């Protein structure tokens, strides 16, 4: 296995463990290995109709081999996410999965920040970590989720939630999840009315400095094409691309 492949494999583990931990806030969402593939799915439920879509992560495995494993063990609604390195062409991957009856849903950039140097951009708003029940309740109302539990607001929590404040209004947010000795960055968002003012950069800078202080070896994230323009400015390096496929006869996840 090459160094590039090893780095991607390590980043994939951070991704699957961090992403699964985030989805587990409402119901356990488990990460496991099935042969050479990673699987993320709901824990057993009493009613099969309640299962959320599951995701299979593939890297450096031939499409027909991956498909055989997925078709044997997958529940009815699933996606197959194939990670390819920067120097690997995507056309053969697209063609191979199309021939097996899949359609491409979307692609995302796969990024890693080594945390050696973190920029310190000026902030036009206040950036803080959510540490009080009051702030947690305020955020929960905005994102329409249950508030972060009181016992998850301290330094021993497995994740850290950050918000950007314009006065007392929350105008941006991001979360860092501890995973496999590193951190998974998720749920990055800035209100449209406050974009292009450096708020996203300020949120990431605070988060990354705290990641490093907590002993993380790197930060990992997936980015849309729009997000891919922000993250390199903050020191993230794209190591690959995620191609997300679903069976053609399956409803969208």
Image: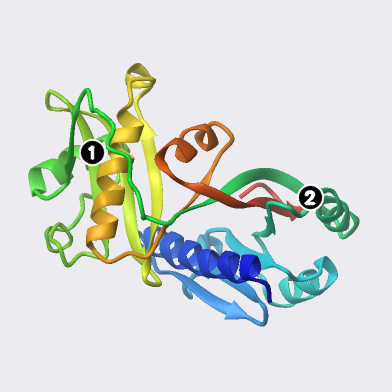
Label 1: which residue? 163
Please tell me which of labels 2 and 1 falls first in the chain: 2
> Toward which corner of the image does residue 39 lie, by quadrant?
bottom right
> Toward which corner of the image does residue 92 lie, by quadrant?
bottom right
Q: Is residue 204 left or right of residue 227?
A: left
Q: CA distance from mark 2 to mark 1?
A: 36 Å
In the rendering, which numbered label is found on residue 90?
Answer: 2
Q: What x and y, as percent, mark residue 97?
A: 83, 57
Q: What x and y, as percent, mark residue 108?
A: 61, 45
Which residue appears at 91% of the width and 56% of the height?
A: 99
Quick one: SS at disc 1? strand
* Residue closest to the eye, 202 or 40: 202
Rate crowding at label 1 as few (under 14), some (14 to 19) or many (20 or more) other CA atoms within 10 Å. many
128 shown above or below 30: above
Residue 76 seen by the camera = yes
- Image quarter hosting the N terminus: bottom right
Q: Is residue 181 left or right of residue 103?
A: left
């Amino acid at each position: 296995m090459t160094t590039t492949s090893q780095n991607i494999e390590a980043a994939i583990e951070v991704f699957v463990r961090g992403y699964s931990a985030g989805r587990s806030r409402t119901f356990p969402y488990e990460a496991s290995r099935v042969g050479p593939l990673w699987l993320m799915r709901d824990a057993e439920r009493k009613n099969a109709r309640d299962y959320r879509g599951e995701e299979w992560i593939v890297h450096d495995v031939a499409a027909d081999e991956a498909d055989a494993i997925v078709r044997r063990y997958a529940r009815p609604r699933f996606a197959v996410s194939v990670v390819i390195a920067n120097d690997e062409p995507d056309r053969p991957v697209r063609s191979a999965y199309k021939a097996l009856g899949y359609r491409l849903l979307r692609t995302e950039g796969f990024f890693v920040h080594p945390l050696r140097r973190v920029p310190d951009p000026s902030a036009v708003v206040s950036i803080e970590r959510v540490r009080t029940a009051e702030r947690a309740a305020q955020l929960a109302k905005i994102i329409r989720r249950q508030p972060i539990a009181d016992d998850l607001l301290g330094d021993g929590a497995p994740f850290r939630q950050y918000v950007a404040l314009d006065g007392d209004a929350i105008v941006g947010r991001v979360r860092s999840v501890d995973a496999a000795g590193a951190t998974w960055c998720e749920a990055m968002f800035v209100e449209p009315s406050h974009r292009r003012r450096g708020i996203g950069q300020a949120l990431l800078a605070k988060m990354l400095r705290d990641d490093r202080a907590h002993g993380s070896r790197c930060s990992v994230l997936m980015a849309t094409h729009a997000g891919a323009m922000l993250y390199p400015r903050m020191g993230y390096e794209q190591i690959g691309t995620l191609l997300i496929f679903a069976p053609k006869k399956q409803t969208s996840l």
